Image (cartoon, grey):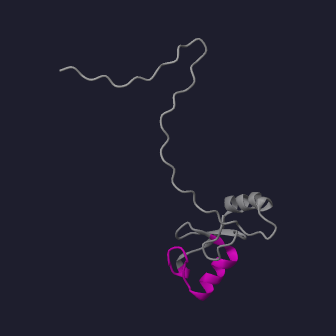
Amino acid sequence: LTCPICGELFSSAVIASCCGESFCDGCAQHQLETEGRCFGCASPKAKLTLHPNRQLRQAVGKARPHLPEDGKVPVVAARPPQSPRRFQAAPPRSGAVPRVPTEPRPVKP
């Protein structure tokens, strides 16, 4: 839910018609005025329009109350990869006899 230009929580999110990327309205307008091109795909200013991204605005509105008081999005470190889980048998159903794991039997020629 953060703008790729400023790195902050989206403020009045808009979507660029050229590439479908979303930005803060202020960031996108500033980018177009100073650079004259889209931050997402480098399309010239003349070839794009900005449209309100209503879904993203709603998502930000729902997330905002759950953020710290300063309004900054906390940076979460990525989890280290976990080793794949071994197969775990489901518990036996009532009345069923549990299966006992056995060693593979050698194949007779």
Residue 94, quarter of picture: top right
Toward the top, the furthest residue is 95
Residue drawn where x is 79% and y is 71% of the image: 70
| Residue 43 against residue 65 in the figure, above or below | below
Residue 90, quarter of picture: top right
For the N terminus, the quadrant is bottom right
Q: Position of residue 19 (x, y in %)?
A: 52, 68
> Which residues make up the magenta segment?
23-46
For the C terminus, the quadrant is top left
Q: Position of residue 88 (x, y in %)?
A: 51, 32
Residue drawn where x is 51% and y is 54% of the image: 81
Residue drawn where x is 72% and y is 70% of the image: 12
Q: From the viewer's side, name the closer residue of 59 and 86.
A: 86
Q: Specify whether 41 is left or right of 70.
A: left
Q: How many tags in the picture?
A: 0
Q: Specify whether 107 is left or right of 72.
A: left
Residue drawn where x is 27% and y is 23% of the image: 106
| Residue 88 against residue 72 in the figure, above or below | above
Q: Position of residue 50 (x, y in %)?
A: 62, 72
Q: From the viewer's side, name the closer residue of 66 and 88.
A: 88
Q: From the viewer's side, name the closer residue of 5 and 43.
A: 5
| Residue 71 against residue 96 in the figure, above or below | below
Q: Is residue 25 magenta?
A: yes
Q: Position of residue 37 (x, y in %)?
A: 54, 81
| Residue 87 against residue 59 in the figure, above or below | above
Toward the left, the furthest residue is 109
